Amino acid sequence: MIYSDIAAITGAAGRRDRLLFVGLTVFSTVLQAASVMTLIPVLHALFGDQPSQAWPWVGLLVAQLVLAWVADGLATRAGLRLGFGLIDAIEVAGLSAIRRLDPAELHSPRASRLRDLISTAAPESISVVVLLGSPLIHALLLTPLLALMLLAVAWQLALVALAGGIAMFLALVAGRRAVAKSEEAFADAGRELDDRVLEFAWAQPTLRGAGVGTGTLDGVLRASRRRGLRLLAWQIPGDTLFSVVLQLVLLAFGATTVALYLSGDLEPVAAAAMIVVLLRIVETTGSLSLLSTPSASAARVLTSVRELVTEHQAAGDPRAGVVRGTGLARGLRADGLDFTYPDGTRALREVDADFPAGAITVIVGGSGSGKSTLLDVLSGLREPTGGAVLADGVPAAAPDRLAEASVVFQTTQLRPGTLRENIGAVDDAALPALAERAQLTELVETLPAGWDSRVGESANALSGGERQRVGLARALAKPAGVLLVDEATSALDAITERAVVDALEQVRGERTTVIVTHRPALVALADQVIVLDDGRVVDSGNVEQLLARGGVFADLWTRWRQTEGWQV
């Protein structure tokens, strides 16, 4: 039920607003039903011998309408507060779920549903309560209330109105159940289509280079189209069933009114007032029909949000008890590390390796050898499926490793703010030294507003090398004892790469630095080199020792040197 989901999502904090919203909306519905029935004495007085007797009834009618209007206004305010409460709950639980996502799940159906939920459910929360909740309560209660009040006029009309309302509600439910599974399938198809379009756009250079067309996307488009047609096909019989039942109810109510009038059991004025009652029933049931599809969609979304909030409550807020880094270099050890991805790919196989405190360790290996996976495990982004990571000889859980690690990725992503905002919370007094270390001094001096210069959308105001140096500065600004660098210079020119190499050289001894690279300039920095092949450590030592022994490293080194001077 929509209400139970909203109650579970907003919790005790939203209890007052929930009661106000529902109570005031119900009160307004009762007043609206009473105002319809008040028309009977109004018309009776107007068409009687003394029309002036209609004034008290007109006054009552106006009072009912004004009170209903005030109640609706107050209910809307409570509904708005409730909607904002839903938004807050979705944002908190959604961010919590994103923090708990394993990097391997970033392109999974779970991540897709989470993205869809946060992007659609939060903006629609207010409309679900105010624009959908109020009309639904009105539509569901008005017909039964009118049926109850019709007992004072004729029990036959009350019976027809009640039976008709129940029949139309059952027809609506039957139609919605028929279409519910198709709606879910259509929503899944939409999410899948979004994912494939994003992947297709992202992989355009590769696809064009390989001569691959749009075949992978065409299949998803066809499946989405089929599910859309299936949804439409299921909606038609449901809508037809409701229309037939509605027509039968109208005929039954009209026939009963005419029969009572002809038999003398219903006065002419009361019979005329039944036209207004009938119109209100038609209006109510018609609005219920129009609301059926959005209400089914809202119910599905709220059920998903409720599961998300329940999961967040069970897991606890990941922001609570956050481990803070000490900024001191720590010796790390990979002790029998194993890592297997959800699809069964085994990336690490009993990896044993030491990363001395303050030293620079370079990890090399061919494509798919497990280099980046090992870096992810050391950083705390992933927990190993076997073995452990030791920090200064003590097993370190993922939160501890995350607190003590800062990472420079192959491509640095910056938000469209200022240079200062992208670096993080750093005192102004520390900025010059940070700029010097990250080789950013010249850049900051040439920018029009220095540290307060905006980097532009997607950081398009900076070159690729400048973005990487900003990423390095951001990593150095974090008080972390471990610095992890993943192919940070693979796309840089020789001059910019030299600047990054000089910056990394300056942190030797201060941080335990682990670098994944295939660039000789960075390998030359190494105090030790670890060679991976098929997820295993096959060799280790300094550059001279590894070259003297030959093997995998010597082969890689020769190929790197041969390709260093390549130009396009």
Image (cartoon, rainbow, N blue to C red):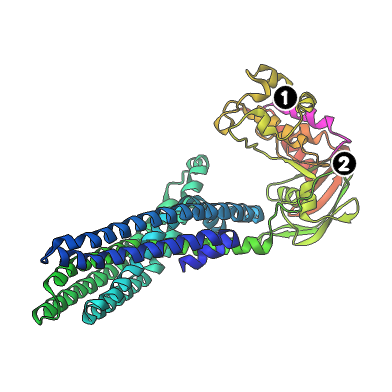
x%, y% of residue 514?
Answer: 80, 42
Q: Earlier in the sequence, mark 1 or mark 2?
A: 2
Q: Residue at x 62, y 63 (%)?
A: 311
Q: How many callouts does the rendering have?
A: 2
One can see residue 116 in this view: no
229 displayed left or right of 368: left
Question: Residue beneath label 1, please?
Answer: 440
In the displayed image of the protein, which residue is found farthest to the right?
A: 393
- Residue 328, numbered label: 2
Amino acid type of the residue tagged 2 in the rendering? Leu
Taking depth in this image into account, of 490 and 433 the one nearest to the observer is 433
Q: How dense is the environment of label 1, judged by Cα within 10 Å: few (below 14), some, or many (20 and up)?
A: many
Predominant SS along the magenta part: helix
Is 198 situated above or below 474?
Answer: below
Q: Is residue 530 magenta?
A: no
Picture quadrant where residue 343 is located? bottom right
Dots 1, 2 in contact, CB < 8 A: no
Taking depth in this image into account, of 167 and 68 the one nearest to the observer is 68
Q: Is residue 510 magenta?
A: yes
x%, y% of residue 262?
Answer: 8, 79
Is 309 situated above or below 176?
Answer: above
Amino acid type of the residue tagged 1 in the rendering? Leu
Give the magenta range.
492-511
Q: Residue at x 66, y 56 (%)?
A: 100
In the displayed image of the protein, which residue is found farthest to the left?
A: 262
Q: Residue at x 70, y 35 (%)?
A: 424
One can see residue 328 in this view: yes
